[in-house]
Image (cartoon, coloured by chain):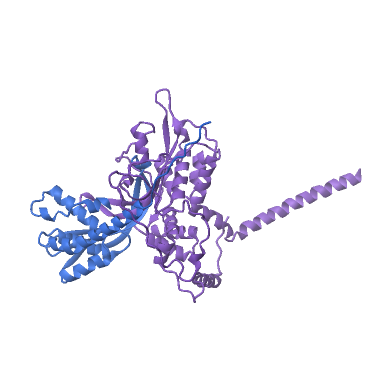
Amino acid sequence: MNSVIGLSSGVGKAGHMDEQDLSQDRRATLAILARGTETELAAPLARHWPDLAVRDLKRPEIGLVMVRGRMGGDGAAFNLGEATVTRAVVELASGRRGHGQMLGRNPRLARMAAIADALWQDAAERPLVERDILAPIRARLARAATQTRAETAATRVDFFTLVRGEG
Amino acid sequence: MYVAVKGGERAIANAHALLAEKRRGDTGVPAIGIDQIDGQLALAVDRVMTEGSLCDRKLAALAIKQARGDLIEAIFLVRAYRTTLPRFGFSEPLDTGAMQVRRRISATYKDLPGGQVLGPTFDYTHRLIDFALAADGGGDAVTPAATAPPDDSERMVRVTDIIAAEDLIEANPAPQDSQPVGDLTRDPLGFPAGRDLRLQNLARGDEGFLLALGYSTQRGYGRNHPFVGEIRMGEVEVELFVEDLGFAVPLGDITVTECQMVNQFKGSLTEPPRFTRGYGLGFGHCERKAMSMALVDRALRADEFDEERKGPAQDEEFVLSHSDNVQATGFVEHLKLPHYVDFQAEIAMLRQMRAEVAARLSGQHQAEAAE
């Protein structure tokens, strides 16, 4: 979660992004959307874009991703086991295509994430997506991470080695 | 041999209805919810995910409910479910070094960069039954967990990296991301198996079986002098390369437990001695499983270190062929299905053998009587 929270939203740079920056920022956006809840996506979409024309290029689909690990943590890859994933691709009337993909089995959620991704790509809509969708999710994740880190820190342990007496 | 039988439909349907009734239990007691299983029997969920080889908490919790708490039955259900889904691809390998750590301990170093954090653990509890949890509303109210300001000044580097910085431990096999990675769900297991296939097999293997094998190595059946270099548990990001986008997209976080076992050294005429490694990784909080996996992983590397294979834990074919509890339960439990024809054949053979013995004995008696 560090990686997500640590990344800037990129809004300030809008209009001056080269392709590399854009895909970095879009990646960060997708990372946030993948962690959104149904309410966090549904409410702002209904409020700001109630009559959005959305075409399903890829209807929401549940499938599997084989999760890989590395031997010893950083060595050669091996297959650890699978995880359920839902994905969807939509197209807006503007022609912008959005991708939604996240762990779990929630077709509605994946489709809403795809819509939010498509909206975000439109420079005119991006500030609203940022303010009412991404920022609240990011804030919740940051709060949860802070709480977890504080609880974990309270269990930090200092062991003392008892020295055996000589003679 | 099992021979197909017909009939019994009504009895089977009634038995399943009875099972459903027994599953529900006393209707005066509220039915248990999936969220309750997920939240309050979390470690059972973790085990079903790891051995079911499918990371999905809600699904594993549902399987536990359907299986009446029989975890191997639940694992079976999860394994069957996964066969109904298409595969979208492979994730980027997890980066456990970037884990949002909730527990991290080491038995090799007292002081570590980033420190040791116990997290939610049974370690150091007294294993006394807590009757307060059984009281009316017992455990409903909990004292909020203590908090402390986290020390972010130091990264929690892997303990094995600290040892590796001094070149005191063998290097991990280098990532060769162009090489295909063996997958047991696609190709049948063959021997000798690469370490990738062995680790996949162990990751989904039965905890009890691997625990016993790991224990056997400690008791001398393939001794390799293990230390827990590090156990860490927490959240890691899963990423999937999406062709249309041209980059790896984060899909969210999963909880994993990792065990780095540091084992006694190996050197050669040309190489200085170094510690050797055993590795364990599983979904959720599965410490016992990850430790057992690491012990068995190291034991199965016997050939790499010219070790004589003496213990069962070092016997690759034995371990990998018997670790899967769904396969094992299938073959053991099929014994209770009708074997009537087979058994009739055995009875006929037994009767014939007995008749032959009786004939021989009576022949001897007659011969003796004649003498």
| Percent of width and height locating residue B160 | 37, 38
Q: Residue furthest left?
A: A15
Residue B32 or residue B176, whichever sits in front? B32
Residue B364, relative to residue B273: is it above or below? below
Residue A87, relative to residue B114: is it above or below? below
| Percent of width and height locating residue B110 | 40, 41
Q: Is residue B148 visible?
A: yes
Rendering quarter of residue B190: top left
Q: Is residue B241 visible?
A: no
Q: Residue at x 13, y 56 (%)?
A: A11
| Percent of width and height locating residue B59 | 39, 62
Q: Where's the C terminus of chain B, which quadrant?
A: top right
Rendering quarter of residue A124: bottom left
Q: Residue furthest top?
A: B269
Question: In the figure, the purple chain has which letter?
Answer: B
Residue A126, relative to residue B213: is it above or below? below
Horizontal arrangement in the rendering, residue B62 relative to residue B6 (left or right): left
Question: In the figure, the blue chain has which letter?
Answer: A
Q: Where's the N terminus of chain B, which quadrant?
A: bottom right
| Percent of width and height locating residue B53 | 41, 53
Q: Residue at x 28, y 47 (%)?
A: B152
Horizontal arrangement in the rendering, residue B274 relative to residue B17 (left or right): left
Residue B263 or residue B320, whichever sits in front? B263
Residue A167 or residue B227, whichever sits in front? A167
